[in-house]
Image (cartoon, helix red, strand yellow):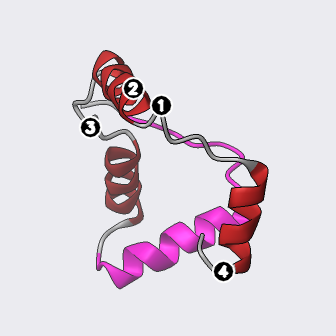
Amino acid sequence: MGTLTIKNMPEDLYMRLKQTAARHRRSLSTEAIECLEKGLHDTGIASTDILSEARKLRKKTAHHMLTDEMLCNAKKEGRP
């Protein structure tokens, strides 16, 4: 198992990590590992799959052209 030393950690980040660890009843080290695991989690989605889906969507919506006027009107109506 590896060891990691973090130098020059901003004080506010350290305090947030410490508070989160206390809230989860974990050690600081265990909480840091948990955060790293979440942040580095592999979604399992390949970039080629994402591009393929984007291309399919682009083909499907190619005939739906939006103009600036249409977008402004939608905003005025309260739509995102």
Q: Which residue is mark 3?
A: 43
Q: Nearer the viewer, residue 4 or 36?
A: 36
Inter-mark Cα distance, 1 to 4: 24 Å
Callout 2, which amino acid?
Lys
Q: Nearer the viewer, residue 55 or 15?
A: 55
Q: Which residue is mark 1?
A: 62
Q: Is 5 rendered above or below residue 18?
A: above
Q: Nearer the viewer, residue 44 or 53?
A: 53
The residue drawn where x is 41% and y is 46% is: 39
Callout 3, which amino acid?
Thr
Callout 1, which amino acid?
Ala
Q: Residue furthest top?
A: 48
The residue drawn where x is 32% and y is 16% is: 48
Q: Quadrant of residue 26?
A: bottom left
Q: Which residue is mark 4?
A: 77
Instruction: Looking at the image, tell me whether mark 2 or mark 3 is earlier in sequence order.
Output: 3
Q: Residue 73's x, y, as percent?
A: 72, 69
